[in-house]
Amino acid sequence: MFLRTPATRTSVALAAGLLTTLLVAGCGHDDDPSVATPSAPATSAAPPSAATTAPSPTASPSPSAPAADREIVVTIAKRRISPPTGRVTVGKGELVRITVTSDVSDELHVHGYDLGTRLPAGKPGSVEFRADKTGLFEVETHETELVLFQLVVR
């Protein structure tokens, strides 16, 4: 026979509460499982007028992150995209890091690779991936529905 003591009831209640919290936290408003909260700020962010699609010579990756073969930096201010929307070509197999800073909270999404991250207002958000699929892929924001650029992987 199993006899529950007050300490056992407390443990069971705490475990149930923790399980409920974990289940609720996993059920956000977004059904896209690939969307992640950025774990660290970007290693470099260009000012709005100097956003670039080339690797920055002064950028130094964090010790835990390998250097990207291609760093693509985009800034969004008042629904204006810098650099202007266009195509960015990378080679198949390159390690690509896309860093976006938006003046409003949003969500970044890389189509075809099903990658994304949250973009807190005024703070950079990054996705990093190996470009192992060839083709043309849109990179956009979800809330403001802005196409940032088209990624061409050859």
Image (tube, grey):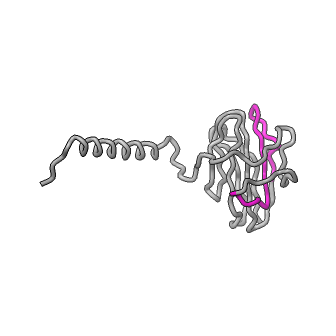
Quadrant in which the N terminus appears: bottom left
Q: Residue at x 78, y 40 (%)?
A: 81
Position above or below: 120 against 113: above
Q: Nearer the viewer, residue 20 or 144?
A: 20
Position above or below: 128 against 26: below
Residue extending furthest left? Answer: 1
Q: Is residue 10 magenta?
A: no
Q: Residue at x 73, y 40 (%)?
A: 101
The image quadrant that residue 74 belongs to is: top right
Q: Nearer the viewer, residue 62 or 112?
A: 62
Position above or below: 52 against 144: below
Q: Position of residue 52 (x, y in %)?
A: 84, 48
Q: Residue at x 58, y 49 (%)?
A: 35
For the image, the number of numbered tags is 0
59 sits to left or right of 109:
right
Q: Position of residue 24 (x, y in %)?
A: 42, 42
Q: Position of residue 121 (x, y in %)?
A: 67, 34
Quadrant in which the C terminus appears: bottom right
The segment highlighted magenta reads 64-87
Q: Nearer the viewer, residue 79 or 75?
A: 75
